[in-house]
Structure formats: C-alpha cells, structure tokens
Amino acid sequence: MKTKKNTSLCDTNTCFMCKNCLEEWRPAICGNKINIKLKKGEVLFKEGDPVTGIYFVYNGNIKVTKQWDADKELILRFARDGAILGHRGIGSNLNYPISAIALEPAVVCYVDMKFFESTLRVNSELTFQLVNFFASELRTAERRMRDLAHMPVKGRVADALLKLRDQFGVTADGFINIVLSRQDLASFAGATYETVFRVINELVNDRMIAVAGKSIAIINADALAALVQSID
C-alpha cells in the first residue's frame, strides 16, 4: 500500500468530511490527511484490524465486506467517490467489524481517530450529517438482513442488479457501469456462486437482462422489480 502525506491527490473539497466542514477547518484537514493509493484487489483494512482512523474515498470503487462463514463474505455496500469508510470502528469497539477492498485502482484519504474526533467537536454540521448517515445505514442493514432471511434468491439477485444500476448508472451501451465478478455479485446478493450463475442464465433466457462477459445490462427493469418481493 502506497501512502503520501499532504499531496494534491485529493482536493479537500468533495469527500464526506470536507464538504460538511467549515471552510476555515480545511487547512487543518490538509495538514493531517494521508493519501493512500490502492491497487485493484488491495485490502485497505480487514475485519478485526485495530481501529486507527477514518477513510474517505477520493476516487475509485471499494467493496465493504463482512465475513459470512469460514470461507464466504457478504458485500454490505460499495463505496465510491466521497464516501466514508471505517466509521463502524467509532466508539468503544477498537476493531474494525468489516473489511474494505479496492475493486479497481483507487485513492483514499485517511485521518487518524484523534484528529477525526476533534473535527467532529468543531464541526457541528459534520456531526449532524454523520448521525443521519448512521441512521440511514442502520435502516438499510435491517432491511438487508430481513431480505436475506425472507426473499428468494432470484429476487435478491434482481434487487442487487437494480441497486447497482441505481448507484453506478449505465454506460453508453446500456450496461451497468461497474464490472463485478460473479463471485462479487453472489456476495452482494447473499447467495452462492453456483446459484447466481444459474439465476443469471435464467434472467437472460427470460429477456430481463443481457450479458457480455462480466458486464450486465438490464433489459426489463419492471420484470426484475416484480421479482423483488418486498415485505414492507
């Protein structure tokens, strides 16, 4: 992992912390941040690591994962430009409860926990927005666990594809603008690789999606949405 301190790799303007801080506080951020360059597949931090600070994505896509069982992971979310990472280590728990892994070359900014806590005390808007973020993430996590318990696999795969399209948009050719391995898609849907492989083939045969290599295009979003059996 390559780190550089006080470089121009990020603009101290667009990440979750910077955009919610007082303008007068940004020089302090610039003086305390560390820029980290990640290669594709590189681990930023892993579940169980001691908490040292908070990370913010400047560019690139990072998957946030939780160990499912001995040899499986569940992808909780994808963090992209501006997103916060490592915030689940805030508080009395001194170990990160999740892992963060780069899906592509990425740049993140890091500040140590002592500076981040000082930033929260000085910047009330950042504290307010962080509380809102925690509340939103908790609601999403609760729904996710409920869906994993009650929604059929085909519905979970359909839901995963729709979420990816909504978060990342589509390319000029109509494909979801993120390329995931089938294993990562399975981890995001909370299913096995073999099951997702079968479901993808079924969705292609039903003309709901189209596939070109690892790229997926949604052809019939309404049909996919109908498979997402909401239990609200």
Image (cartoon, grey):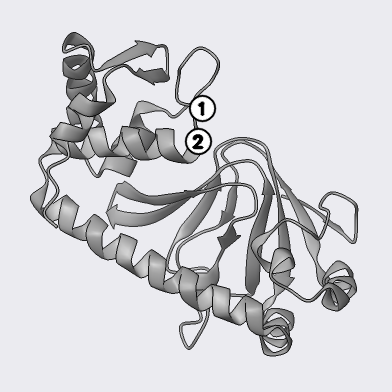
Alpha carbon separation for disc pair 1 and 2: 5 Å
Kindly state the secondary structure of the residue where label 2 is placed: helix
Q: Residue at x 26, y 39 (%)?
A: 159
Q: Position of residue 150 (x, y in %)?
A: 9, 51
Q: Quadrant of residue 206?
A: top left
207 on left or right of 57: left
Badge 1 density bin: few <14, some 14–19, many ≥20, Cα 10 Å: some
* Numbered mark located on residue 168 in the image: 2
Task: Look at mark 1 in the image and give the residue it sits on.
Answer: 177
Q: Earlier in the sequence, mark 1 or mark 2?
A: 2
Q: Position of residue 61 (x, y in %)?
A: 57, 42
Q: Residue at x 41, y 28 (%)?
A: 181
Q: Amino acid at mark 1?
A: Asn
Residue nearest the observer in this picture, 184 or 167: 167
Residue nearest the observer in this picture, 21 or 144: 21
Question: Could one spot residue 194 in this view of the protein?
Answer: no
Q: Quadrant of residue 12?
A: bottom right
Quarter in which the C terminus is drawn: bottom left
